[in-house]
Image: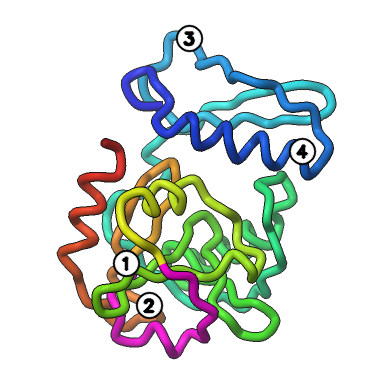
Amino acid sequence: MVDGRLPLGHLHLARLAHSCRALQVPFPGALDVPAGIADGIVRYQISDAGVSSSLRDPTESPHRPLSLILSGVVHRPYPHKTTDRGRFDDARARARVAGADDAILLTLEGRVAECAIWTVFWWEGEQLATPALELGILPGVARVRLGQLVPIEERKVEPAALAGRSLFVANAARGVVSVATLEGRPVPDDGRTAELVARFWD
């Protein structure tokens, strides 16, 4: 929530409706905005029992450039945002023990997938790229939003393809955040990332 509203709420509802149909969970329709709260990260949980919500402090997710490592936790297909997130929690916990903010999970075939709480993006010349949904990547709201701002190409790449690239990550809670290091190596900056930071919430 920002200033008492839910940014990109229509995109969240569209993804929720799709997942409810796929998982055969009753779609609740519009979601009520918690009263008396100006800023925070609201999490809605939908089940056969109905809708529950919780609020998280927005300062838990950083705005500063992040340090990423490659995770030893294998990525498994995660096409719907569910509570089955043990492997992501494990990957993030291991990253923090290693002194990093988050980790990029790889598929069983060694392809770049997604971070524990972020979608990964990188610049290839004039093109913005991100892992292909076909790999079982979560169709994140931030990914959809960025696709409204700039064309995005899907890629199936191994980590070596990211070497020397300017990377950033994004999610619907924090928007676009640049990446400072990957595996301890500096990641080059790109002014276009700063432009997307500024435009993401417009």
The quarter in which the N terminus is drawn is top left
Secondary structure at badge 2 equals strand
* Quarter holding residue 132: bottom right
* Mark 4 closeness class: few <14, some 14–19, many ≥20 residues within 10 Å: few
Distance between the alpha carbons at the discs numbered 2 and 3: 40 Å
Helix, strand or loop for disc 1? strand
Look at the image and give the residue range highlighted in magenta. Answer: 153-167
State which tag comes first along the sequence, 3 or 4.
Answer: 4
Residue indicated by mark 2:
182
Q: Nearer the viewer, residue 12 or 152?
A: 152
| Disc 3 target residue | 35
Q: Which residue is mark 1?
A: 179
Q: CA distance from mark 4 to mark 2?
A: 37 Å
Q: Residue at x 35, y 81 (%)?
A: 184
The extreme bottom residue here reads 160
Disc 1 marks which amino acid? Val
- Nearest the viewer among 8 and 117 is 8
How does the figure colour the protein chain or chains?
rainbow
Crowding at dot 2, Cα within 10 Å, few <14 / some 14-19 / many 20+, comes out as: many
Q: Which residue is mark 4?
A: 21
